[in-house]
């Protein structure tokens, strides 16, 4: 008796790049519209961008600022996805579900704290000069 061949799932229709991009942007927009922490992080990102324009930061500094904004917002979206998947898979409380959700949230916090530290390094010296200039020193 020969073993029966394993059936593979039917092939998925290939999506165009533009369709995939539209789906991804829809997901990002959903997180930004519905998640309070993402809204706070987005507001802080806009504040950092405004401050960077006002203080005329350098191109390498812009690269760092935009990278960190992307990192924090991206991790917030991953955190939201992990929380939703865990809630779907395990609606009741479970220590492993808590571990997964807390770890994902922790990743966002670590990135946010690092971003604040970098923001201080970039913005604080310039802000100090503005204060000194305003005081006539």
Image (cartoon, grey):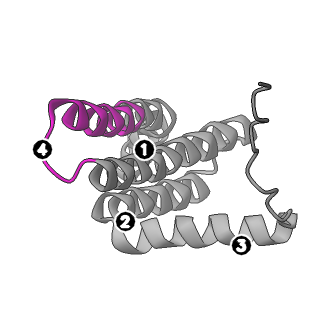
Q: Nearer the viewer, mark 1 or mark 2?
A: 2
Which is nearer the N-term, disc 3 or disc 2?
Answer: 3
Identity of the residue drawn at 75% across and 44% down: 7
Question: Mark 2 highlights which residue?
Answer: 39
Numbered circle sitting on residue 22: 3
Q: CA distance from mark 4 to mark 2?
A: 27 Å
**Magenta stretch: dominant SS?**
helix
Which is nearer the N-term, disc 1 or disc 3?
Answer: 3
**Residue closest to the eye, 137 or 8:** 8
Image spot of residue 119 (x, y percent): 45, 38
Looking at the picture, does residue 17 appear above or below residue 5?
Answer: below
Residue 1 quadrant: top right
Q: Secondary structure at mark 4?
A: loop
Please state if 8 lies on the left or on the right of 129 as rendered. right
Which is nearer the N-term, disc 1 or disc 2?
Answer: 2
Q: Which residues are magenta?
A: 90-112
| Quadrant location of the C terminus in the rendered image | top left
Q: Secondary structure at mark 3?
A: helix
Residue 61 quadrant: top right
Q: Secondary structure at mark 2?
A: helix
Q: Residues within 10 Å of mark 1 (few under 14, many from 20)?
A: some
């Amino acid at each position: 008796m020969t073993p029966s061949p394993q059936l593979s799932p039917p092939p998925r229709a290939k999506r165009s790049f533009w369709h995939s991009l539209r789906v991804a942007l829809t997901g990002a927009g959903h997180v930004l519209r519905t998640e309070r922490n993402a809204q706070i992080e987005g507001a802080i990102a806009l504040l950092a961008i405004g401050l960077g324009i006002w203080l005329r930061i350098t191109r390498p500094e812009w690269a760092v600022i935009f990278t960190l904004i992307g990192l924090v917002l991206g991790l917030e979206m991953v955190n939201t996805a992990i929380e939703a998947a865990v809630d779907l898979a395990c609606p009741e409380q479970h220590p492993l579900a808590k571990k997964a959700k807390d770890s994902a949230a922790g990743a966002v916090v670590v990135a946010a704290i690092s971003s604040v530290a970098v923001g201080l390094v970039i913005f604080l010296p310039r802000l100090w000069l503005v204060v000194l200039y305003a005081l006539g020193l």
